[in-house]
């Protein structure tokens, strides 16, 4: 969960301040640079950010994701509630 929070925080800062470099992201978020670098790599693989010589910039996919964040979060909460209602399988 902590890593997901880091990914979302990085993406939010890139959306607001891009292009933004890893050093500034590290300073703004107070996270170790290796964690920020990992989040950037994951976000780039998922096509939410692109790296440029000036720093990371958000893609249209990132803007779309944040525009629909509340709806997507609501769907996820509903799915998790359904999973929670299922009874665990007992050991025999």
Image (cartoon, rainbow, N blue to C red):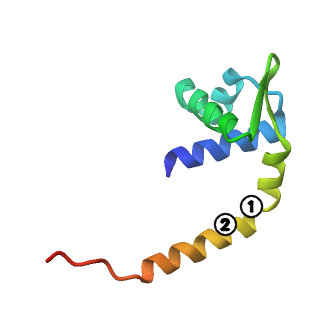
Count neighbours of disc 1 (C-alpha within 10 A) and say few if under 14, some if 14 to 19, many if 20 or more: few
Question: Which label was assigned to residue 30?
Answer: none
Front residue of 36 and 72: 72
Front residue of 74 and 44: 44
Question: Which label was assigned to residue 69?
Answer: 1
Seen at 59% across and 42% down, the residue is: 6
In the picture as drawn, the residue positioned furthest to the front comes out as 92
Seen at 73% across and 39% down, the residue is: 47
Seen at 59% across and 33% down, the residue is: 30
SS under mark 2: helix
Please state the horizontal and vertical placement of residue 85, each as a whole percent of the image.
43, 83
Q: Quadrant of residue 59?
A: top right
Seen at 83% across and 32% down, the residue is: 18
Count neighbours of disc 2 (C-alpha within 10 A) and say few if under 14, some if 14 to 19, many if 20 or more: few
Q: Quadrant of residue 70?
A: bottom right
SS under mark 1: helix
Q: Are marks 1 and 2 in contact (CB under 8 Å)?
A: yes
Quadrant of image for the C terminus: bottom left
How far apart are the alpha carbons under marks 1 and 2? Answer: 6 Å
Does residue 60 lie above or below 74 as drawn?
A: above
Q: In the image, 90: left or right of 31?
A: left
Q: In the image, 35: left or right of 67?
A: left
Query: What residue is pinned by disc 2?
Result: 73
Does residue 43 lie above or below 5 as drawn?
A: above
Please state the horizontal and vertical placement of residue 79, each as a whole percent of the image.
56, 74
Front residue of 28 and 52: 52
């Amino acid at each position: 969960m902590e890593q997901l929070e880091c990914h979302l925080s990085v993406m939010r800062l890139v959306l607001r301040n891009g292009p933004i470099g890893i050093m500034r992201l590290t300073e703004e978020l107070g996270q170790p640079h290796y964690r920020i670098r990992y989040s950037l790599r994951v976000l780039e693989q998922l096509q939410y950010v692109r790296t440029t010589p000036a720093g990371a910039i958000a893609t249209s996919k990132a803007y779309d994701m944040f525009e629909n964040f509340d709806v997507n979060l609501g769907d996820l909460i509903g799915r998790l509630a359904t999973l929670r209602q299922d009874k665990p399988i007992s050991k025999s």
